[in-house]
Amino acid sequence: MSGRASSDTLAPPVPIEPGAERIVRRRHYGRWVAAALALALASAFAFSLWRNPNVNRHVVLAYLFAGPTLSGVLVTVELTVLAMGIGVIGAVILALMRLSHNPVLVAVALAYQWFFRGTPQLVQIIFWGFLGALYHNVIIGIPGTRIVFFSAPTSTLVGAFVAALLGLGLNEAAYASEIVRSGILSVHRGQVEAALAVGMTPRRTMRRIVLPQSMRVIIPPMGNETISMLKTTSLVSVISGHDLLTNLQNIYSQTFQVIPLLIVACIWYLFLTTILSVVQARIERRYSRGVATGRQRTRLRPHGIRGTRTSQ
Amino acid sequence: MSDPILRLQGVCKSFGAQRVLNDVNLDVARGEVVCILGRSGAGKSTLLRCINHLESIDSGRITVDGQIMGYRARGHVLHELGEAALARQRLAVGMVFQQFNLFAHMTALENVVEAPRGVLRMARGDAEDLGRALLRRVGLADRCDAYPSELSGGQCQRVAIARALAMKPKVMLFDEPTSALDPELVGEVLDQMRDLAKEGMTMIVVTHEIGFAREVADRAVIMDEGLIVEEGEPRATLANPQTDRARAFLARVL
């Protein structure tokens, strides 16, 4: 539309009394075009899948709720939850060590991060899985004496599941600690000073003032990590952990129905990811207290952000 | 001065090679209101932050109500206190910041109640009664449940004053409390401070509000390059400074 044509059509022929005009909001034609296009593409793709004989939806349906699938889902969920538990707790400890004034703690945390981020995760999991080959027995005592408090063969202490947990959780702690650290650093220094000024100890300040505010920054990337962990759990196949993908791979290595079983895996991973996204959105809303409501905050448009002038 | 509540003796402080406080001596009597004036970078804010040991001093000694801030004297040696002991000492000193520094994730009432509950171990009901009373006092009885982002700058600063008063401090420090405010909001904060002064609170106020200093302060202190260059009765000091440095500063702000 040229500027000239629009100015011709928009010029009112007769003056209308101000306040009497009807207001018509801007029309978003682009949205309708985009919606039609997206719908067409999605239905074409769905149709092609539906008609594709290689997909074999009967096999998909048969295995979607089969025993090995469900037990695999359970293991995957257990591993994700527990490994993220270890990861998050470890991450907070490492982040606090990195930010402490104690140079020894800083060095230890740096060394931990250096090692666990610097070696491949697959190798770490294999090492934990075959820890018995490295150390036959776990012995806790006083070196140079015959005093032993505890002794057991490694293989009974660290089974496949525990090895998988350690391999996933300890690695996660190293990565997630940087997320926690950036969250803590994002809290304005004045918050700490105000807390100290009313007589709070540094420990209490961290727990009551800094960490709750850093959550807003920590949650989105931590949600990323959790979803990523959900799929990384499949690495434990190398130490015969029975997670979802490993169980399905075992099936198709015998039946050769690769595509349908991988579709089963995708359906379950997508389902679990969806649940995690919903949980993440809830947690995010909880920790956005005092900033703005979630909807306003996630909008990119400037007019969606209100009341930020007086905020700190 | 027979029994000063706050006493600064030979206080020196450097940031790296830069000397920020250079042998500062100041006695403040109970109930006295002292306004500290001076151009930016003169060391005013650092001086306040040293009083409650947010910054540690390099030499000299700061005493609040007989207690040496930040240190324990043993013979001729000063041992720096641990964090818990420091936190206890800071209870005697309230502080109000230029940027308010309200806890952003807490409502106005939660901001005021947090330390009485967590530090003084007050029961929830008692702490909330105290919090509501203090917010009523600063004229914000109806904004107890508002978050800092929903309050104007002046309201934020009044909440911050209530938060500091909740700990029943013996001395209140104000670090440019109105410098971050829109001009029309300055008055409401100064009114609160005026009331507080009338009630006999000991106050050290770093400010650029010459009018407030003249009207409310018992003493004006002018600092320049880490030194107190002039001090005295505010009207006389501000109208007729004796030193060149004080004159130069006042010529610029008056």
Image (spheres, grey):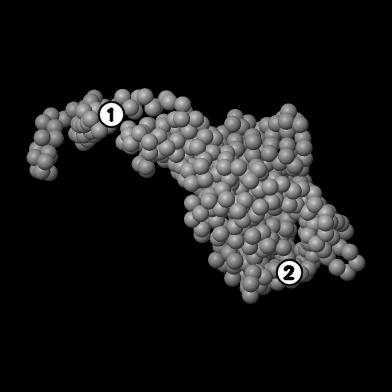
Is B105 placed above or below B181 here?
above
Is B69 placed above or below A224 here?
below
Residue B8 appears left or right of A188: right
x and y percentages locating residue B176 in the rendered image: 61, 54
Residue B145 or residue B219, whichever sits in front: B145
Residue B231 or residue A117, whichever sits in front: A117
SS at mark 2? loop
Residue A231 appears left or right of B222: left
Q: What's the CA distance linking mark 2 and mark 1?
A: 79 Å
Residue A209 or residue A111, whichever sits in front: A111
Q: What kind of residue is marked 2?
A: Asp
Q: For the point 76% across and 69% down, which residue is it?
A: B59
Density class for disc 1 (Cα within 10 Å; few <14, some 14-19, many ≥20) is some
SS at mark 1? loop
Q: Is residue B213 visible?
A: no
x and y percentages locating residue A124 in the rendered image: 54, 53
x and y percentages locating residue B31 in the rendered image: 78, 50
Q: For the point 56% across and 48% down, which residue is it?
A: A129
Badge 1 sits on which subunit? A
Q: Is residue B84 visible?
A: yes
Residue A9 appears left or right of A210: left
Q: For the point 69% across and 51% down, which residue is it?
A: A137
Quadrant housing residue B79 = bottom right
Density class for disc 2 (Cα within 10 Å; few <14, some 14-19, many ≥20) is few
Q: Which mark is residue B58?
A: 2
x and y percentages locating residue B33 in the rendered image: 73, 53
Point out the residue furthest to the right here. Answer: B75
Q: What kind of residue is marked 1?
A: Asn
Quadrant housing residue A40 = top left
Residue corresponding to mark 1:
A56
Q: Quadrant of the C terminus of chain B?
A: bottom right
